[in-house]
Amino acid sequence: MTALLNDIAVHAPMRIDAELITPSGTAVQWREWLSGNPEILIKSHTGSALIAREALFA
């Protein structure tokens, strides 16, 4: 899904802004998810945090 979004963004005339949202409501910016960084910035109803990538959908 994010690879497809990235392909569309490459050709879009404007910057695309989107987030991936887990069933629990935690969100991560799609470009951050694609970055491959071991830690990612997430947002939730309790605030923002830097977490390990593998913990997002755990």
Image (cartoon, helix red, strand yellow):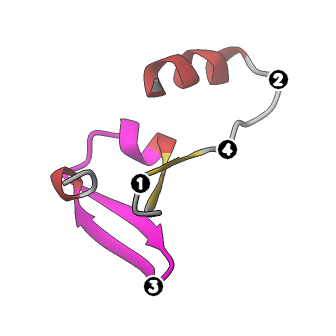
Mark found first going from the N terminus, 3 or 4: 4
Q: Which residue is mark 1?
A: 23
In the rendered structure, find residue 17 and report the number of the disc placed on it: 4
In the rendered structure, find residue 46 and report the number of the disc placed on it: 3
Q: Three-letter amino acid code at disc 2?
A: Pro
Question: How many C-alpha atoms fall within 10 Å of the one at disc 3: few (<14), some, or many (≥20)?
Answer: few
Q: Is residue 3 left or right of residue 58?
A: right
Question: How many C-alpha atoms fall within 10 Å of the one at disc 4: few (<14), some, or many (≥20)?
Answer: few
Residue 57 position, x and y percent, is: 26, 51
Mark 3 lies on a secondary structure that is loop
Label 2 to label 3: alpha-carbon separation: 34 Å
Magenta stretch holds residue 5: no
State which region is magenta.
Answer: 32-52
Above or below residue 38? Residue 12 is: above
Q: Which residue is mark 2?
A: 13
Residue 18 position, x and y percent, is: 62, 44
